[in-house]
Structures are given as C-alpha cells and as structure tokens.
Amino acid sequence: MNSVTYALYLGQIVAVQVKADLTSKSIPVINGLRGLAASMVCIFHFVVPAGYIHNTEVRDFFDYGKLGVYIFFVISGVVIPLSMIRNAYGYRNWGTFMMKRTVRLEPPYLATIVLALIYFQVRKLAPTSVALEVPLSLKNVLLHLGYLVPFFNGEWILKHFWTLGVEFQYYLILSLLLPFVSGGNKIYRYCFYLIFLGAPFLLSTYLFIPVYAPVFLVGILYALWKTDLIESREYFILTLLCIAVGIMTSPMSRSITALLTILVINFFPYVTNSVFEFLGKISYSLYLLHPLTGKSLINVLSYKYKAGYQVTVLIIAGYILSVISAYVFYRIVEKPFQRLSGKIKYNRTFIPVKKQHI
C-alpha cells in the first residue's frame, strides 16, 4: 500500500469514526460556533460601519467579523434538516414545523422591534455622533411581520434583520423540498441539488436566499450524509461543487467560511467550553439586541471619547453591555418561548429511507 493510498484509507476511517460518533441528538461544538458567530457580527458592527476606528488595517481585520453570518447559515443548513429527518418530517408535519419555528423565533424578533421603536424615540433626546435615519412608516413596520420587507421594497428597521429574512426564506423552501430529498428518489434529490446550486446564477441580490443557497447546501449535505441518506462519495462531490459555485458567484471568503465551519463541526464535534457555551445559549438574543445596546452606547459616547485607548475601551464596554442585555433578554423573552417550541411535537408518520446508493 503506497503512502497516498494509505492516507486516503486513514481519511476514510477518520470520516467513518467521526460520523459514527455524531449519532447523538446534540453536537456541542455547534453551540460554541453560534456564540462565536454572534460575537463576530457584534464586533464588526461596533468597529467597521460606525467609523470610530480610522486605521485601515484594523478596519480590514475586523471586517471579517461579518463572516459570522455565514457561520449561522451553515449551522442552519445542518441543524434544521437534521432535526426534521430525525423527527420523520413529512408534509403532514408542515404546520407543526412552521409553528415550532414561529414560536421559537418570532416573539424575540417582535420584542426587539418594539424595543427598537422605543429606542428611536429615546435616542432623539441624546447627542449622537452618527445621524439617525430610520424608516418608521406604518407600512414599513408592518412589512416586518412575515419578513416581507424585501418583497415590497421596504427597509429593515434594524439593518441586520435582512439575515432573519433570508433564514425564514430558507425554512419555507426546505419545508417544501426536504421530503423529496429524504424520500429515496435519486432524481428528486439531484433536482434539489440543482435548485440550490443554480439559484445564485439567477438572482444575486443579498436580500434573498439564492445567493446564499450553496452555503446552506453545505450544511444540508452534511445532515444528509450524517443520517445515511447519501453516501460519502455523493457528499464530498456535492460539497466541492458548493464551494466551487460559491467562489464563482460571491466573495471567496464566504465559501472558505462555510468549508471551515463544516470541518470544525465534523472533526471537533465535542469541543466546547463554558464561555462559548454561554455565548451560544444567548447568541440569538445577542444577535438581535446588540445594535440597540452595545452599538448605541458606543454611538452616544464616541463623540466625547476619541483617543485610541478610549475607543478600544468603549468597544469592549459595548460588547459587555450587549452580552449582559442579551442574557437578561434571553431569560425573560427567548427562553420561555424556546421551551414552548420544544413542547410542540411532530406527528411521526413519515419514515425516511436510510441508505441511498449511487
């Protein structure tokens, strides 16, 4: 056995062992990745768009924080279909699926909108270093119900809500197409791949899912492989196609982020620590609230504290305030609905086909 063959053989053994170890319901590293992703986005919003730091090299470094969004997309690509498949999702469960997603995510989102509307009124009373331009018409606010803003040329009250709209589009599409993939028909499965791989060539605006479809598919493929619905060869080939399409249709950094995220999930599934576990637990609340808490603190005080060390301390203080506020929000708003969502059970009437050979 030559060295190349031996290396490939060892790679297959590692892949099989890791895959076999991932039969449990949870993958601990994913929670840590959520905390990392939310923190990356926070720091990005505190440093880059606000213009408090003028050093180009520093700004370019923290600009990578926006890649946390694509970590979230890959995670959704993994955990949502994985949960659906394990719970024998079928069309009879469509209402249950949407109810679970709505109960889990919508109340914190709506509560954040209410807090934002209050904040915009209060903020008028305080001096700021950045002009405030917020679309507060009744029509625009109502478009946030159902994430309809991009479909009617509206504007998000909080700019980062666009990612929530993309996620919701993903939930709808997956809920309609996953039964075709998990039902065992190879033609249907390949048509599903074609839709996700071809979508970014048809529509490239950042407000809609097509441009991010290959990133989501990286996670979906992993879930299908992990549950033995596709073989290893199909998984690896399609994952490489996702990376290739992603590089052709969007910045390479997105595809690299997607690949690194799935590699961490696969090879380090049980890596975690208390800090990232905590940040992962409050990651949704942290993501929702940080523009209203940490970024607001920075915006209000930045006109007065402009020295280099003061800006650094202010950004750190903004992050700490965001984390504390997110924890309170998580306990009061998010956690109760998270528990309520968990009590909604699927009707397990659809049994997915296990091994699919190509």
Image (spheres, rainbow, N blue to C red):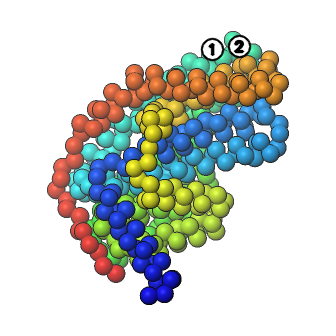
Q: Which residue is mark 1?
A: 122
Specify the quadrant of the image occupied by residue 17.
bottom left
**Pointer 2 local density, CA inside 10 Å: few below 14, some 14–19, many at least 20:** few
Q: Which residue is mark 2?
A: 126
Q: Quadrant of the N terminus?
A: bottom left
Q: CA distance from mark 1 to mark 2?
A: 7 Å
Observer able to see residue 131:
no
Picture coordinates of residue 269, whole percent (x, y) = 41, 53
Picture coordinates of residue 358, whole percent (x, y) = 34, 81
Picture coordinates of residue 241, whole percent (x, y) = 52, 72
Observer able to see residue 174:
yes
Which residue is at a point 69% across and 15% down the rendered structure image? 124
Specify the quadrant of the image occupied by residue 54.
top right
Q: Residue furthest left?
A: 349
- Relative vertical location of residue 218 with respect to residue 136 in this rendering, above or below: below
Which residue is at a point 19% across and 62% down the rendered structure image? 351
Q: Left or right of 43: which side holds 181?
A: left
Kind of residue at disc 1: Val
Q: Left or right of 19: which side holds 135?
A: right
Picture coordinates of residue 323, whole percent (x, y) = 53, 27
Q: Foreground: 141 or 116?
A: 116
